């Protein structure tokens, strides 16, 4: 669709008049042919008409919308700063002509949404969902391209600051992900003029006398780096500057931005418009640093590299397996206010996520919050079908939880009279690994390749379950609101 969106007033007129406005200047001039095509969709496709009516009740807030076909399969995901306006634009006459939508809007049979806290949150959520679900009509964001981070190293005498798409899993403080690498690099240049940190890859040791004779780069000459490479600043003073930078990044930016705004006003009053314009642009770049996701909420598991071969070899040794676990599946449970429970199943092939093998389940036969019975149900459903269809079981099945969750999964196999694959559970608090028939868990070091691979599987299953959880939560709230309006 075009980046321009119909106004809310346009949207109300469209939906109340057979979804065809007399004129939508943002998209196209509806012709009789376009109006005929939309009328045909409304007359012949009950799901399309229902979706058009459903959009009328969408909030005018940022979020992500998910379009589904008659089988309930998500066929398109998009982001919006105004959900009602943006999602509703697909039911305008011009959508039947737009090159990116004309060939598939007739497949729309249902539409759902997820509220997001901001446009940035919506963009990051859209990207994650597209990578996970792989809707057939989303052409972009299906690849492995990731969002950038601002990284401050923490294990060095003189920490470095850099923009990176491949952050370190340890030894660094990360900010992001950010949605624009260009804006982040521009802000980085401004921050370097203020805080004078280093961006080089030199391994500088404070106690090495050879650095006293090192020739600093140009950044030291233009006062954008305090040149620890030439011992021009002490370790303590340099780290004080880094702490100031971290304070700025973590919400303490108003003092600096206030000073810059004052400088801009003074430059403008002196008719130094070039300086004022430069300060205006720098203020905007720094202000944009707040437009970022949080690592816990918007995890990009593909950027935190775990050596898959070492992880599989270590798991084979730790668990006493006959061969390396090439296919690993992980199961996690999430709850929706004690009423709806959902489960996710993720699949790893050769130590890496295999998205076509991901599955979501809505728990059907468990009331309230009961992880054990929920795990029993999803394991029963999953492996009963696989057994009946003679599909190959995974080499390793990992359950998120402790000994109780593992026993619930074992009971499911026993009740289905199915021989289970190798199974473990991973308890989050102490990262203990439980095995069937063993009273004591396996405890591995935090840097163990085996543990890190299991954590990767567990965290991916948890993240995938939470996305489904949020989708159902929005759907439940939306349905309840509709019921309330219908009663009136």
Image (cartoon, rainbow, N blue to C red):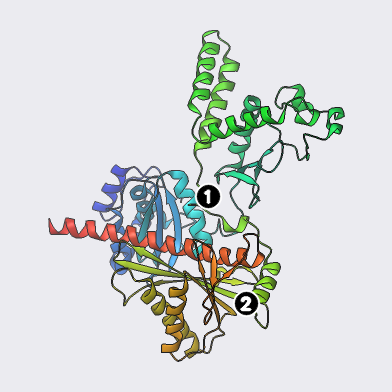
* Residue at the extreme front of the image, as rendered: 440
Q: Does the rendering let one see residue 334?
A: yes
In the displayed structure, would residue 255 be above or below residue 144?
above
**Foreground of the two, 390 or 295:** 295
* Mark 2 nearby-residue class (10 Å; few <14, some 14–19, many ≥20): some
Q: Does the rendering let one see residue 39?
A: no
Q: Earlier in the sequence, mark 2 or mark 1?
A: 1
Q: Are marks 2 and 1 in contact (CB under 8 Å)?
A: no
Q: Which residue is mark 2?
A: 319
* Mark 1 nearby-residue class (10 Å; few <14, some 14–19, many ≥20): some
**Foreground of the two, 188 or 227:** 227
Which image quadrant is residue 220 in? Answer: top right
Residue 189: x %, y % from top left: 65, 31
Q: From the viewer's perspective, is 391 left or right of 51? A: right
The disc label shown at residue 295, or none = 1
Q: Closer to the observer: label 2 or label 1?
A: 2
Residue drawn at x 43%, y 60% is 467
In the displayed structure, would residue 144 be above or below residue 176?
below
In the displayed structure, would residue 90 be above or below residue 275?
below
Residue 376: x %, y % from top left: 40, 79
């Amino acid at each position: 669709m075009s980046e321009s969106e119909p106004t809310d007033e346009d949207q109300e007129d469209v939906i109340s008049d057979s979804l065809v406005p007399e004129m939508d200047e943002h998209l196209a001039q509806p012709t009789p042919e376009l109006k005929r095509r939309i009328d045909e969709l409304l007359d012949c496709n009950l799901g399309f008409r229902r979706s058009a009516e459903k959009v009328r009740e969408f909030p005018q807030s940022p979020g992500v919308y998910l379009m589904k076909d008659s089988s309930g399969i998500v066929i398109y995901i998009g982001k919006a700063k105004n959900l009602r306006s943006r999602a509703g634009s697909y039911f305008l006459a011009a959508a039947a002509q737009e090159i990116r939508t004309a060939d598939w809007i007739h497949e729309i049979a249902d539409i759902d949404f997820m509220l997001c806290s901001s446009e940035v949150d919506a963009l990051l959520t859209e990207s994650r969902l597209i990578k996970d679900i792989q809707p057939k009509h989303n052409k972009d964001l299906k690849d492995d391209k990731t969002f950038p981070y601002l990284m401050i190293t923490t294990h060095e005498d003189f920490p470095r600051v850099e923009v990176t798409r491949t952050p370190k899993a340890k030894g660094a403080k990360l900010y992001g992900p950010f949605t624009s690498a260009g804006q982040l690099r521009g802000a980085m240049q401004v921050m370097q003029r203020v805080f004078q940190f280093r961006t080089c890859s030199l391994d500088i040791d404070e106690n090495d006398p050879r650095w006293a004779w090192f020739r600093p780069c140009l950044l030291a000459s233009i006062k954008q780096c305090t040149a620890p490479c030439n011992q021009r600043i002490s370790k303590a003073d340099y780290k004080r500057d880094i702490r100031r930078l971290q304070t700025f990044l973590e919400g303490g930016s108003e003092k600096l931005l206030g000073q810059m705004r004052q400088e801009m006003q003074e430059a403008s009053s002196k008719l130094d418009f070039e300086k004022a314009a430069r300060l205006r642009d720098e203020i905007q770049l720094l202000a944009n640093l707040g437009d970022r996701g949080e690592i816990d909420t918007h995890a990009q598991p593909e950027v935190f590299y775990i050596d898959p071969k070492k992880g599989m070899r270590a798991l084979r040794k730790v668990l006493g397996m006959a061969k390396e676990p090439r296919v690993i599946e992980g199961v996690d449970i999430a709850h929706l206010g004690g009423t709806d429970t959902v489960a996710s199943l993720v699949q790893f092939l050769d130590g890496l996520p295999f998205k076509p093998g991901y599955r979501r389940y809505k728990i059907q036969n468990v009331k309230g919050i009961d992880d054990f019975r929920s795990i029993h149900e999803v394991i029963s459903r999953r492996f009963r079908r696989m057994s009946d269809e003679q599909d190959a079981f995974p080499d390793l099945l990992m359950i998120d939880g402790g000994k109780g969750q593992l026993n619930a999964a074992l009971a499911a196999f026993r009740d289905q009279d199915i021989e289970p694959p190798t199974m473990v559970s991973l308890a989050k608090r102490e990262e203990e690994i439980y095995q069937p028939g063993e009273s004591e868990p396996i405890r591995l070091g935090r840097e163990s390749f085996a543990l890190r691979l299991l954590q990767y599987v567990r965290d991916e299953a948890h993240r995938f379950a939470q996305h489904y959880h949020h989708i159902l939560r929005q759907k439940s709230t939306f349905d309840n609101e509709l019921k309330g309006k219908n009663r009136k």
